[in-house]
Amino acid sequence: HIMFRIALSLSLLVTSSLAEKTEVVGCRNTGWHINYRVDAKYSTWVDESDNARSSLTHSGNKIVISPEDSFQFTPEIGYGKFNDIRIKLQGETEPSSDMSTGLVVSSGLDTETKDWAKEKLGRKAVEEFVVPMPKSNSVGLEMDIVSSKIILDKQDMVLCHEIEHGSHYCHTTNNADINYCHTTNNVDITEVAVKKPQQDKEDILWICCHEGSGCHVMTVADKAFIVADESKLLSEVASN
């Protein structure tokens, strides 16, 4: 009962297969460098002062992902950092209003993160982007950047980090929630094509850049939601 009352007094989205849901109300504008799957700094994190964007997106540069990132592996329910992250986020958030700025959900339902994104973005329809699984192992290799293209430019966005299977930490990134301490659309995602040692085919990584902070490689199965293009949705419905 004590934890339940604490959960109501705060606000982020956190989820797990135990059908738990915690919304954390408050202001939190740090921690972009944290990989919530392992509760540690991304091995690929580069500060903006060290030319983060060019380091992780410009052709000719190299990317190495540490095994400690759990980049391609998501722990099963109960074997990861879900409960630790939920408690940590509640403790770090500074209450500033009655509005939810993030959510930790544990229902295991695919629709829960999308429904929360709709609420935060103020739309009935959102478009979902999921970090793809590479064709082959991408961990512990020195990969050469071949090309890059921005797939989600600076705009209202909700990001969801999968901590355990079906368990996510979601948060608004910018103007999607005025109580999230941001005044500009400051996050973008770039798709980077890389070549691996002794392999002919290229593979894909997604790079997330936080303006004013830095950039990192996104972990497999993490999600991004944006407002859906209504004209695109209408054409898809018409074609079906």
Image: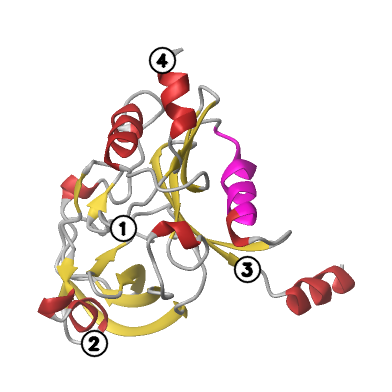
Magenta-drawn stretch contains 217? no
Between disc 4 and disc 2, whose residue precedes? 4
Tell me residue 110's x, y (percent): 60, 42
Kindly identify which numbered label has been placed on residue 2.
Answer: 4
Kindly identify which numbered label has been placed on residue 59.
Answer: 2
Task: Indicate which label's residue lies in the foreground, 2 or 1.
Answer: 1
Q: Name the kind of residue labelled 3 in the image.
A: Val
Between disc 4 and disc 1, whose residue precedes? 4
| Distance of label 3 from label 2 (alpha carbons) | 30 Å
Task: Indicate which label's residue lies in the foreground, 3 or 4.
Answer: 4
- Sort mark 4 into few (<14), some (14-19) or many (20+) by Cα contacts within 10 Å: few
Magenta-drawn stretch contains 111? yes
The residue carrying mark 1 is: 29
Tell me residue 133's x, y (percent): 41, 57
Between disc 3 and disc 1, whose residue precedes? 1
Q: Name the kind of residue labelled 4 in the image.
A: Ile
| Distance of label 3 from label 1 (alpha carbons) | 22 Å
Secondary structure of residue under mark 4? helix
Kindly identify which numbered label has been placed on residue 94.
Answer: none
| Distance of label 4 from label 2 (alpha carbons) | 52 Å
Tell me residue 92's x, y (percent): 27, 41
* Tally of numbered tags: 4
Tell me residue 70's x, y (percent): 26, 45
Secondary structure of residue under mark 1? loop
Q: Name the kind of residue labelled 2 in the image.
A: Ser
Between disc 2 and disc 1, whose residue precedes? 1
Secondary structure of residue under mark 2? loop
What colouring does the structure picture have?
Answer: secondary structure
The residue carrying mark 3 is: 227
> Is 182 placed left or right of 111 in the picture?
left
Residue numbers of the magenta segment: 108-119
